[in-house]
């Protein structure tokens, strides 16, 4: 999150709601200035680690609205969410991605680099974070987005979960937090799925850690 980086590490802040709300308000203000007419919130200088970035900023704006009810934020949330749903959802296999268990699954994922073949191994963590950001939005947007967008986001998040756990296997890249993110995202998602799908999502997280290449200590 380039906007957060400009304020320095959050652990340097006083541990008070007021301090965190001030940072959140500053981030939201910068995002409102940066958002494009199409709804893109990506940093213009960023080339990698980008496929989930706009969605992550949308989740921060949704959280900021939940905390402060800034009347400018609902439109920005809806517009930026529409951008991700329209422009940043990939369903064709990324050529060169080595960790597919199922080819041509048609399941959605988030690319680490938007250009095909460019660093495809990063697609797994980008999708794990996209899943987390999607469910963060679902948790924060009660009354903020319409039923059509909410339904589309639930379906997308479920597709991300299935891609992470069914179509691919986990490559730790010396970062086991990616698997933890996947598990947490799946557990959070379960609350938003119909009962049958939700209970299955809650049971499946162990798939993330039963892989051919387990995280190293």
Image: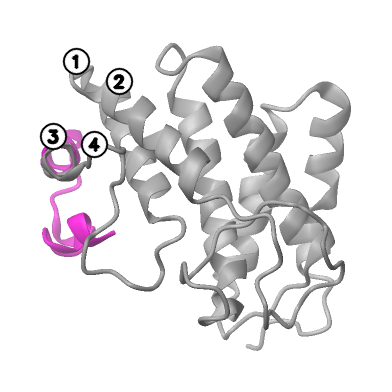
Main secondary structure type of the part rendered in magenta: helix
Q: Which residue is mark 2?
A: 74
Horizontally, residue 54 falls left or right of residue 109, namely left
Q: Residue at x 49, y 14 (%)?
A: 146
Residue 51, placed above or below residue 142: below
What kind of element bears circle 3? helix
Which mark is nearer the camera, 2 or 3? 2
Q: Residues within 10 Å of mark 3 (few under 14, many from 20)?
A: few
Q: Residues within 10 Å of mark 4 (few under 14, many from 20)?
A: few
Which stretch did the figure color magenta?
1-29
Q: Which mark is residue 37?
A: 4
Residue 29, placed above or below residue 160: above
Q: What is the x, y in percent for residue 129?
A: 52, 56
Q: Residue at x 58, y 59 (%)?
A: 127
Q: What is the x, y in percent for residue 76?
A: 27, 29
Quadrant containing the C terminus is: bottom right
Quadrant containing the N terminus is: bottom left
Q: Which mark is residue 18?
A: 3
Q: Which mark is residue 71?
A: 1
Q: Residues within 10 Å of mark 2 (few under 14, many from 20)?
A: some
Q: How is the image coloured?
A: one colour
Horizontally, residue 142 falls left or right of residue 53, namely right
Horizontally, residue 23 falls left or right of residue 175, namely left
For the residues labelled 2 and 1, say whether their Cβ atoms are less than 8 Å apart: yes
Which mark is nearer the camera, 1 or 3? 1
Which mark is nearer the camera, 4 or 3? 4
Closest to the observer, 132 or 104:
104
């Amino acid at each position: 999150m380039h906007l957060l980086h400009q304020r320095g590490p959050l652990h340097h802040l006083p541990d008070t709601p007021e301090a965190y709300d001030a940072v959140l308000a500053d981030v939201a203000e910068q995002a409102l200035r940066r958002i494009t007419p199409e709804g893109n919130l990506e940093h213009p200088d960023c080339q990698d680690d980008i496929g989930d970035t706009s969605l992550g900023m949308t989740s921060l704006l949704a959280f900021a609205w939940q905390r402060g009810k800034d009347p400018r934020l609902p439109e920005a949330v809806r517009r930026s969410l529409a951008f991700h749903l329209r422009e940043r959802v990939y369903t064709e296999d990324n050529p060169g991605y080595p960790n597919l268990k199922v080819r041509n699954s048609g399941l959605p994922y988030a690319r680490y680099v938007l250009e095909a073949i460019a660093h495809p191994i990063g697609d797994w963590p980008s999708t794990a974070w996209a899943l987390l950001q999607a469910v963060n939005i679902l948790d924060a947007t009660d009354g903020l987005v319409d039923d059509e967008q909410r339904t589309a986001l639930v379906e997308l998040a479920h597709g991300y979960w299935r891609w992470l756990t069914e179509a691919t296997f986990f490559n730790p890249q010396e970062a086991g937090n990616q698997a933890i993110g996947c598990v947490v995202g799946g557990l959070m998602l379960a609350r938003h799925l119909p009962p049958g799908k939700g209970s299955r999502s809650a049971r499946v997280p162990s798939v993330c850690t039963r892989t051919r290449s387990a995280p190293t200590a």
